[in-house]
Amino acid sequence: MVIEAESLNVRRLGRHVLRDISLRIDDGECVSIIGPNGAGKSTLMSALIGLVPADGGVVRIDGAEIHRLPRRQLARLIAYVPQIHDGYLGFRVRDVVEAGRYAHLDPLEPLKGQDHAAVAAAVDACRIGELLERAVETLSGGERQKAWIAAALAQQSPALFLDEPTNALDPAHQVELIRIMRDHHRAGGTLLVICHDLNLPLVLGGRVIALHRGGVFFDQPVEALQDTGRLEQLYGARFALHRGADGQTVSIHLEMEPS
């Protein structure tokens, strides 16, 4: 499956948010989207799945214009986990994950054997079996995020879109979510991730698209993040690279002025 944007423009509340965006995501790619606040990252992801209308240009999936695809068909192609989730209070985790199968069912149709198998596989992948009977509002932030991602995996869509999946999570839950993302990609799935943590793309690999003021600042292999001068241009802050004891592992840190 190939996802393409050609000369994409988006306006929101009378303001240009995306300007002349052209990109291509090939089947099985891992792509991270970075950029400062307000650069248009979430809007771009929403536009790629038709949640916000284009003011110009076009988005295509395998050559078909996205606005011509029925929502159920689109959900079978791309599973999306936003930053903020409305609703589901009072529902069990089991209900949330099973909702991921609705794209494959007619209205009011009960889950069948293949649906239960998909749900079980997603629960196992996210290791949330012990949470299934818990109400969503009783979960920690990390547990909730794993539940939402399990619902997305239950869709069995070839592409998984995640908007800041590790934001505000403790290190243990970040490691768990990175494992889930890597497993999806290693199994041949397409992965598109918005992240503020610049070390997440380094861990995931693949390529990185940097947005700045609604346009593409660069679109290159993830190793481009090691150019701290370019990051300073993008964010207006200074960065330093740290190498691990093996001399190969690289992490990115803000370079702070001495107090």
Image (cartoon, helix red, strand yellow):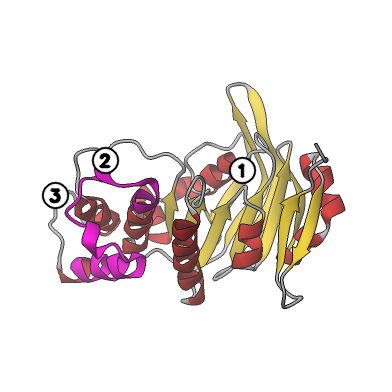
Q: Main secondary structure of the magenta part?
A: helix
Q: CA distance from mark 3 to mark 1?
A: 35 Å
Give the residue number, with chain letter if any, for mark 1: 41
Q: Amino acid at mark 2?
A: Glu
- Foreground tag (2 vs 3): 2
Q: Amino acid at mark 1?
A: Lys
Give the residue number, with chain letter if any, for mark 2: 137
Residue at position x 47%, y 49% in the image? 169
Instruction: Confirm or deny contact between disc 2 and disc 3 (CB under 8 A).
Output: no
Is any atom of residue 67 visible in this view?
yes
Give the residue number, with chain letter if any, for mark 3: 108
In x, y percent, where is residue 17?
A: 65, 33
Residue lying furthest top: 14
**Residue 166 is a magenta residue:** no
- Foreground tag (3 vs 1): 1
In x, y percent, where is residue 184?
A: 46, 69
SS for callout 3: loop
- Please state if 73 lies on the left or on the right of 255 as rendered: left
Q: Amino acid at mark 3?
A: Leu
68 or 242: nearer the viewer: 242
Mark 2 vs 3, N-terminal side: 3
Q: Image quadrant of residue 63? A: bottom right
Residue at position x 74%, y 75% in the image? 248
**Residue 139 is a magenta residue:** yes
Magenta region, residue range:
116-145
